[in-house]
Image (cartoon, rainbow, N blue to C red):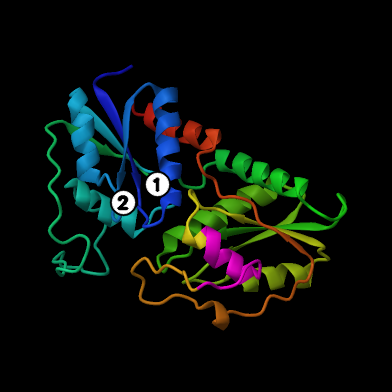
Amino acid sequence: MNDNDAVLLISHGSSLPYAENTFKEICTKFKKKSGLSTEVGYMKVSDPTIAQAINILKENSPKRIFALPVFLSPGIHTNIDIPTILGLDPLETDPRCPDGNYPEDHYLYGLEEVEFDGEIKLLKPIGPNDDLLEIINKRIETSLEGSKISNDAKTAILLVSHGSRLKYNKEFISTLHEKFSKDSSYVSDFGFMELVEPNIPQSINKLTSENEIERLIVVPVFIAPGVHTNNDIPVILGLKEDNGHSQSHDHDHHDHHHDLTKIEFDGEVLYPEPIGADDILIQILEKKVNSYL
């Protein structure tokens, strides 16, 4: 174990237990594999907060802390919120509040001060890492094991991402899909849950209108399960009834399920689990930290 270095795995945080359970498992696996002192800190909603997690790490007197956002793509959270919470300079100007003076009801107002005498090294999020393709292929294989139609049924893949008004999320999923499509025999596309097009119904209708498809596997490219993966996306896909438990994450507008284009596909729809604490994800995180050791 390298006692001079510690790792802070940063998550968004959720009011539901799914994400917290997943990140506890990610942290346990990462700590065991890397041998580094490691804690999870949540940006908001959940505990421990980022500042609280750093205080826990300080008990082992590290000289350097690697702050690793366990996010798939860059965005406001990784480029502005997390650096600000850590007491570092944001990577870009906040379009929500360009002068940096946040109102009292904003989660960046009156932040708990991070106290650490050593170096805090903020790493980049995961990005369209080639190893993610292995996880996606695993999810596809697992889905096919539960299929109720013929093994040779014509199958298509849809990669689903959250969506963002900023460019980063679209760049991430489009690049990841490009890599996936080069090595896959399946016809495929990508779509967004909200905020940006193509949305899920649009992408499905495009796939099914341009190809003969009997089976569709919709892969949620999300780290942890939560309201979006357990409710919002299944409702959009028609796999469950809308229970009114959609979550907003402080966005000004979300696509409402009843406003979305109707999905014109009556074949089999398979919907696997998100990435979770997959061993491959742990390897991805370890490689990112090791590149700085």
Q: Helix, strand or loop at disc 2? A: loop
Q: Would residue 242 be counted in the magenta stretch?
A: yes
Nearest to the observer: residue 10 or residue 163: 10
Nearest to the observer: residue 85 or residue 273: 273
Quadrant where the N terminus sits is: top left
Which residue corresponds to the image point at 26% horizontal and 58% vertical from the top-left?
92
User: Where residue 177 sits in the image (x, y, percent)?
Assistant: 61, 54
The residue carrying mark 2 is 46
| Cβ–Cβ under 8 Å for marks 2 and 1 | yes
Sequence-wise first label, 2 or 1: 1
Picture quadrant where residue 107 is located: bottom left
The residue carrying mark 1 is 20
Magenta residues? 229-243
Q: Residues within 10 Å of mark 2 (few under 14, many from 20)?
A: some
The kind of secondary structure the magenta stretch mainly shows is: helix
User: Where residue 24 sits in the image (x, y, percent)?
Assistant: 40, 38
Q: CA distance from mark 2 to mark 1?
A: 8 Å
Q: Is residue 91 visible?
A: no
54 sits left or right of 142 in the view: left
